[in-house]
Amino acid sequence: ANLAPTLNDSVSDEDACRLLVKSTAAGEGTVGKDKVYGGEIFEQLMEHKLEELQVGAQHLEGTKSEMRQLMEEKLEADQQMRARQQEEQLENQRLAQEKAQKEIDSIRGQHEDVAKQQQELLQKLQEQQMELQKQQQMEALR
């Protein structure tokens, strides 16, 4: 069957053997009822054809192996690229969080400064009010 892969199931075994003897073995064999007969040349031609097919199969297997290797390498490269992208995303998120925290700290610091200034102004105002009350009490006593 490997010698004539183009044959379909509708071709009888006897016709397939005749076709093989004619095409592959250059007519150097004879198809009998149960056997194919041929001389040394026929055997050599058939063995040569089988060797060609085996070499082709080995080449095909090698090509499959190379393709499998390439696919594995591509898969690994894709996984590494995804891992790098995830690392970059995590790093970008970390940097964004740090920036946001710095902005929060800056706003908090500004708020504390404003609150401190308000407290100082309120304390000065209270001191001034107390001083004014003392002056008014002193003038009232005179």
Image: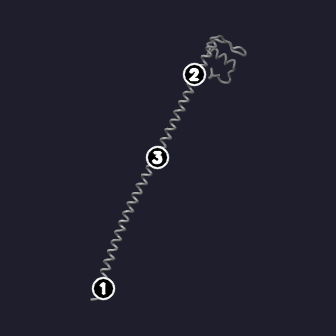
Identify the mark at residue 137; answer none if there is no mark.
Answer: 1
As drawn, 73 above or below 104: above
Cα distance between the residues tagged 1 and 2: 121 Å
Among numbered discs 3 and 2, the one appearing first in the sequence: 2
Which residue is the extreme one toward the bottom?
Answer: 142
Q: Position of residue 55 (x, y in %)?
A: 57, 22
Among numbered discs 1 and 2, the one appearing first in the sequence: 2
Determine which residue is flagged by label 2: 55
Q: Quadrant of the N terminus?
A: top right
Q: Residue at x 33, y 71 (%)?
A: 120
* Kind of residue indicated by mark 2: Val
* Kind of residue indicated by mark 1: Gln
Q: Quadrant of residue 4?
A: top right
Identify the mark at residue 87; answer none if there is no mark.
Answer: 3
Q: Quadrant of the C terminus?
A: bottom left
Helix, strand or loop for disc 3: helix
Among numbered discs 3 and 1, the one appearing first in the sequence: 3
The residue mark sitting in front, 3 or 2, is: 3
